[in-house]
Image (cartoon, grey):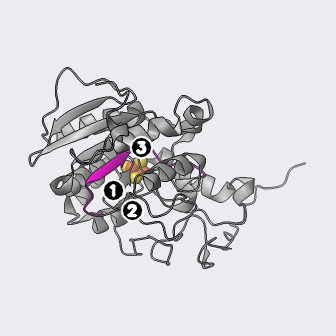
Amino acid sequence: MTGPLLPRPVLPRPVLPHPVTGASFASPVPPGRGWPGDRAGPSTPEAADAGMVQELAASAPDLGALDALISRCRACPRLVAWREQVAVDKRAAYADQPYWGRPVPGFGQDRPRVLVVGLAPAAHGANRTGRMFTGDRSGDWLYAALHRAGYASLPTSHHAGDGQQLTGIRIVAPVRCAPPANRPSAAEQRACEGWWSRELELVEPHLEAILALGGFGWAATLRAARLRGWRVPGPAPRFGHGARVVLGSPLREVRLVGSYHVSQQNTFTGRLSEAMLDQVVAALAAPGQQRPAASLDLPP
Ligand code: SF4
C-alpha cells in the first residue's frame, strides 16, 4: 500500500570554504558575496532570454559592467540547469569546495592587445572556479604557454584568487556556460553571441591579434567579426593549427591565428605539443617583436 505523495524537503545547500580565501559560499555562488573576481551584485539584472542578452549587452558601458551582466545570465534553460546541477553534485575530488556554477566572464586586461578565444567553460574547471581555463588540465597547458611568452604572471592557474595576472591579453569564450558534453546547441550559441559581440566591440580599440583555440573558436571569431562589420577575406578562411588570416577592424588590421584546442584529447595524444603551442602564441606578438619561433614551420 502506498501513502499520499509528500513534497520532497528542500535541503539547505552546504556552505563550503573557498580553497584560496577560506570564505564560505553556497553552490552556485550568489552574486556579490566576495568570490574573487565576481563583478556582479544582487541588483545586477538577469538576462532571461536571447533578446534580453542583446539589450543588456548593448547597455554595458565597459567590460566591468559586461562581466557582471554575463555572470548573472539565465537565457538558456538547458545550460542553466546543467551548470547548476554540476555545481551541486560536484566531482568527488572537489566535494569539499564550493562551485561557481554561473556563466564565466572573460579574464584578463580590460584593454587587451591580444584575445584568446576558446569554446565554453569546462564543467569542473571554469564552472567550478569561476575563471576562464582555470582548474583543469587544459588551463595548465594554456597558462604555462602564456607564462613562457610573458603574458601570464604565473605558470599555473588553479583557482580565482591565486594571484594570476595577465598582461596585454584577455581570455574569453563565445559560450559562457558549461554545456553537456562540451556541445552547446546552435540556439545556445546564438543566444550567447550578444555577449561575445559586445565584448569584441569593447576591446576593438586596442586589439591587434586573436588566438582561436580550435575550430569552434575560429568560426565564432569570424562570425563575430562579420557581425561587427570587419573585413573578412572570402571564401571563409579555413581553420588549422598555425593558420593565419588578417581581419580588418574599423581601426586596424587584426591578425587571427589558429591553434589546436588545449583539450586533453589533443595534449594527451600529442596532437598538440608545448612547442606547437609556443609557436602560435609567439605569432601573436606585434610585427617586429616576434621571436624566431613565430615564423617557423607554420602554414601560411
Ligand atoms: S550560454 Fe550565454 S546566453 Fe546562454 S545562459 Fe549562459 S551566458 Fe546566458
Q: Using the image, tell me which numbered label, if any, was put on residue 118.
A: 3
Q: Distance between the residues labelled 3 and 2?
A: 16 Å
Q: Can residue 261 be seen in this view?
A: no
Q: Using the image, tell me which numbered label, if any, was put on residue 219.
A: none
Number of other residues with Cα within 10 Å of mark 3, as a class: few under 14, some 14 to 19, many 20 or more = many
Q: Nearer the viewer, mark 3 or mark 1?
A: 1
Q: Does the magenta stretch include residue 116?
A: yes
Depth check: give the residue in front, 243 or 117. 243
Cβ of mark 2 under 8 Å from ligand 1: the answer is no
Q: How far apart are marks 3 and 1 (CA)?
A: 14 Å
Q: In this view, does 299 lie to the left or right of 182?
A: left
Read off the residue under disc 2.
Answer: 166
User: Please, what is the three-letter code of the amino acid marked with disc 1?
Assistant: Ile
Q: In which quarter of the image is the C terminus?
A: top left
User: Please, what is the three-letter code of the amino acid marked with disc 2?
Assistant: Leu
Q: Are marks 2 and 1 in contact (CB under 8 Å)?
A: yes
Q: Which of marks 3 and 2 is in front?
A: 2
At x 12%, y 40%, the residue is: 229
Depth check: give the residue in front, 177 or 62. 62
Quick check: 175 above or below 300?
Answer: below
Mark 3 residue element: loop
Quick check: 101 above or below 78?
Answer: below
Q: At which x and y percent is residue 138? A: 55, 45
Q: Can residue 102 be seen in this view?
A: yes
At x 59%, y 33%, the residue is: 265
Mark 3 or 1, nearer chain start: 3
Query: Which stretch appears magenta?
Result: 110-124
Name the dominant secondary structure of the magenta segment: loop
Q: Using the image, tell me which numbered label, if any, was put on residue 169.
A: 1
At x 43%, y 35%, the residue is: 185
Depth check: give the residue in front, 239 or 94. 239
